[in-house]
Image (tube, rainbow, N blue to C red):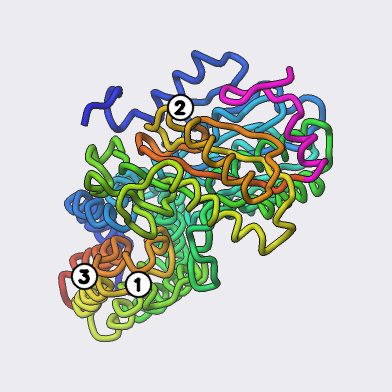
C-alpha cells in the first residue's frame, strides 16, 4: 500500500527532476515552441514544494495531489499549467480520502487523470504531445513503476519523427518533424519520479 | 544579447510598475498581474477582459481604458496568464452587466480562460468568451490547434470596447466581437527571430538574406523560409494571402480597415513604406481602404518584421471604430 509519504516523495522527486532538467526542457521547446517549458514548469513545481510543505501532515494522498494540481494551475500558465494541473487534480480526486491506496488504485487513478488531460487538450496519442509519454507510461504501470518510466521515456523519444497536430508546435506543420516534444519529455520525467519514489520496483 | 532589464525574472513585474507610474488612470496590481481601468465599474457597462503572454506590448495592457478594455491580465513572457488572474479581473470590472473575455486562439490561453470562466460563473457572474483566430498562415482544421489570434485582436478589442462603452448589453457586445473576428484576417512575416529574456538568445536562426513567411507572435518560425523579398513583394504576398481567405466569406470589394503592424524591431520608416505598398495592392485589387492604422501594436518582443490585418467593415463597425478611445497605446476623438 502507498501512503501520503509516497506521494510527497513522488512530487518532491518530480520537482527535483524539473529543477535538474529545466534547461533541457527549454532547449527542446526552442525549435518548435517558445523556449519556456522548463522555466514555466520550474516555477510551478517550486510552488508545489512550498504548498506541500504547508499542507496538513495528516493530508491523505488524494488531497495532496489535488493541492499540487491546483498549485500548478495557479502558477504555471500556458497550456502546461491546466494540463499538468488537471492530471494531478483528477488523479487525486480518484484516490478519494483514503490514507493508503494500492498500486492498482494508483494505476486506475492515473489512468483517469490521463483521460482528463486528453479531453481537456483534445489530443490523442500520435499528435506529438504529453500523451505520447503518458499513455504508454501509465499502461505499463500494470507491470511495474520502473516499466512505466521506461515506456514513458521511449514514448517521449518516439515523438521526434511525429508531425505536431496540437499546441504551438502544430503551427510549424512539417517543420515540427525531427524534434522531440518537450511536453512528452517532461511527462516522462514525472513518471520517472514516480518510479524513484517507489524505489524502482512495483 | 543586451537588454534593458534588471533580471529576466522581473521583466513583467518591472514593466507593470512602469505602467503604474506612467498611467495614473490605470489601477495596476503588480503582485496579482492585473491592469484595470479605474472607472471600470462605473456607468453600468459590460466588462471587457483580455490577456495573454507578455511580450506583445502594447497588447493588451496598453489597450485598457475608455472605449476599449476594462482590464488586462499579463502572463509571463509568451505564456498565458493563470485562471486566478482572469477571475480576479472579472470580479474587478463586473458591474452586474456581465463580462466578455477576449481570448486569442492559443491552447494555453483557451484552457486558462475556460477555467476562469467556469470559476466566474460559479461565483454568479455572467461570462461570454470570444475567440480571436485571424491568422491565415495556419491551416484551420479539426486536427490542428486552429488559427492563431494576432493583429485582428486589436480590431476586436477596439470595436467591441466601443460597443460596451455605449452601453450595449453582453450578448450584443459578444456578437459584435465575433463579427469583427469573422471579418478579420492577418498574415505576418519575420526578418529576424526574437530573443526572450529567459533564453537570452534568438528563438531560431535566420541567416542574412532570408525571411520567414507566415509567422506568429511568439518567436516561432513561419510556414516557409524564402530568399529576402522587397517591401513591395512582401505586400503582394501577404495581402494576397489575406484577401484570398477573406473572399471566401464575403464580397471581395467591401471596404476594409487596414492594420500594418510592426513586430517590434522594424522602424516606422519601413512600416510606412510597407503600408504604401499594401495600399497600392489593395487599390489595384479594387478593395477600398476605409481606415488605416500603422504602428507597433501586436508585437513579438524584438522581432523584426510586420503583419497585415484587414477587417471587412460595414457602416456600424466603422462607426464603432471611429468612436472615442483613450488608452495608453490608442487614443483619438476624446
Task: Compute the Cα span from label 1 to label 2.
Answer: 38 Å
- The residue sitting at 81% across, 26% down in the picture is B43
- Residues behind callouts 2 and 3 on a single chain: no
Task: Check disc 3 and report its element: helix, strand or loop.
Answer: helix
In the rendered image, the vertical position of residue A2 relative to residue B228, given as above or below = below
Along the line of sight, the residue nearer the viewer: A34 or B312: B312
Image mark 2: chain? B
Specify the subunit that label 3 lies on.
Answer: A
- The image shows residue B101 at horizontal and vertical percentages of 65, 45
Q: Is residue A41 magenta?
A: no
Toward the viewer: B1 or B316? Answer: B316
Q: Is residue B324 visible?
A: yes
Look at mark 1 in the image and give the residue it sits on. A163
Q: Which residue is mark 3?
A: A195
Label of residue B268 in the image: 2
Classed neighbour count for the residue bearing mark 2: other residues with Cα under 10 Å, few (<14), some (14–19), many (≥20) = some
Assess whether mark 1 and mark 3 are in contact (beta carbons under 8 angstroms): no
What is the CA distance from the residue labelled 3 to the residue labelled 1?
A: 29 Å
In which quadrant will I find the N terminus of chain B? top left
Q: Nearer the viewer, residue B204 or B290?
A: B290
Magenta segment: B314-334
Mark in front: 3 vs 1: 1
CB atoms of marks 1 and 2 within 8 Å = no
Q: Secondary structure at mark 1?
A: loop
Q: Neighbour class for label 3 at 10 Å: few (<14), some, many (≥20)?
A: many
Which quarter of the image is occupied by the C terminus of chain B? top right
Q: Nearer the viewer, residue A112 or A57?
A: A112
Instruction: Please tell me in which quadrant of the rendered image residue B97 appears.
Output: top right
First reached walking from the N terminus: tag 3 or tag 1: 1
Amino acid at each position: 500500500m502507498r501512503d501520503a509519504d509516497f506521494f510527497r516523495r513522488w512530487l518532491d522527486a518530480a520537482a527535483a527532476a524539473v529543477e535538474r532538467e529545466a534547461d533541457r526542457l527549454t532547449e527542446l521547446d526552442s525549435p518548435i515552441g517558445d523556449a519556456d517549458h522548463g522555466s514555466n514548469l520550474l516555477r510551478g513545481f517550486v510552488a508545489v514544494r512550498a504548498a506541500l510543505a504547508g499542507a496538513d501532515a495528516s493530508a491523505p494522498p488524494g488531497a495532496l495531489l489535488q493541492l499540487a494540481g491546483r498549485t500548478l494551475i495557479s502558477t504555471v500558465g500556458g497550456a502546461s499549467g491546466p494540463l499538468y494541473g488537471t492530471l494531478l487534480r483528477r488523479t487525486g480526486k480518484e484516490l478519494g480520502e483514503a490514507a493508503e491506496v494500492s498500486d492498482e488504485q494508483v494505476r486506475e487513478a492515473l489512468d483517469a487523470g490521463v483521460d482528463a488531460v486528453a479531453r481537456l487538450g483534445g489530443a490523442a496519442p500520435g499528435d506529438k504531445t504529453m500523451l505520447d509519454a503518458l499513455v504508454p507510461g501509465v499502461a505499463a504501470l500494470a507491470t511495474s513503476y520502473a516499466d512505466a518510466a521506461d515506456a514513458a521515456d521511449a514514448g517521449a523519444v518516439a515523438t521526434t519523427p511525429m508531425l505536431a497536430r496540437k499546441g504551438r508546435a502544430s503551427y510549424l506543420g512539417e517543420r515540427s518533424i525531427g524534434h522531440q516534444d518537450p511536453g512528452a519529455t517532461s511527462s516522462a520525467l514525472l513518471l520517472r519520479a514516480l518510479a524513484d519514489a517507489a524505489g524502482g520496483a512495483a | 544579447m543586451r537588454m534593458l532589464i534588471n533580471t529576466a525574472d522581473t521583466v513583467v513585474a518591472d514593466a507593470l510598475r512602469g505602467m503604474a507610474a506612467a498611467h495614473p488612470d490605470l489601477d495596476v496590481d503588480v503582485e496579482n498581474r492585473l491592469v484595470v481601468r479605474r472607472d471600470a465599474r462605473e456607468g453600468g457597462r459590460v466588462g471587457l477582459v483580455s490577456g495573454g503572454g507578455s511580450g506583445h506590448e502594447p497588447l493588451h495592457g496598453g489597450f485598457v481604458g475608455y472605449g476599449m478594455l476594462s482590464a488586462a491580465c499579463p502572463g509571463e513572457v509568451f505564456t498565458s496568464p493563470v485562471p486566478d488572474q482572469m477571475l480576479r479581473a472579472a470580479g474587478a470590472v463586473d458591474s452586474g452587466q456581465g463580462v466578455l473575455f477576449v481570448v486569442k486562439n492559443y491552447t494555453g490561453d483557451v484552457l486558462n480562460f475556460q477555467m476562469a470562466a467556469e470559476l466566474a460563473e460559479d461565483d454568479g457572474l455572467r461570462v461570454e468568451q470570444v475567440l480571436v483566430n485571424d491568422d491565415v498562415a495556419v491551416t484551420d482544421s479539426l486536427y490542428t490547434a486552429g488559427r492563431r489570434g494576432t493583429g485582428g485582436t486589436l480590431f476586436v478589442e477596439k470595436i467591441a470596447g466601443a460597443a460596451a462603452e455605449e452601453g450595449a448589453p453582453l450578448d450584443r457586445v459578444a456578437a459584435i466581437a465575433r463579427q469583427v473576428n469573422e471579418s478579420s484576417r492577418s498574415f505576418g512575416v519575420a526578418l529576424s527571430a526574437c530573443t526572450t529574456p529567459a533564453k537570452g538568445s534568438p528563438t531560431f536562426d535566420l541567416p542574412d538574406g532570408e525571411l520567414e513567411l507566415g509567422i506568429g507572435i511568439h518567436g516561432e518560425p513561419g510556414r516557409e523560409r524564402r530568399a529576402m523579398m522587397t517591401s513591395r513583394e512582401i505586400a503582394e504576398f501577404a495581402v494576397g494571402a489575406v484577401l484570398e481567405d477573406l473572399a471566401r466569406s464575403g464580397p471581395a470589394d467591401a471596404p476594409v480597415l487596414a492594420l500594418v503592424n510592426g513586430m517590434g524591431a522594424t522602424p516606422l520608416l519601413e512600416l510606412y513604406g510597407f503600408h504604401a505598398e499594401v495600399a497600392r495592392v489593395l487599390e489595384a485589387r479594387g478593395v477600398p481602404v476605409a481606415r488605416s492604422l500603422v504602428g507597433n501594436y501586436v508585437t513579438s518582443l524584438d522581432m523584426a518584421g510586420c503583419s497585415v490585418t484587414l477587417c471587412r467593415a460595414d457602416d456600424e463597425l466603422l462607426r464603432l471604430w471611429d468612436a472615442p478611445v483613450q488608452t495608453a497605446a490608442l487614443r483619438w476623438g476624446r
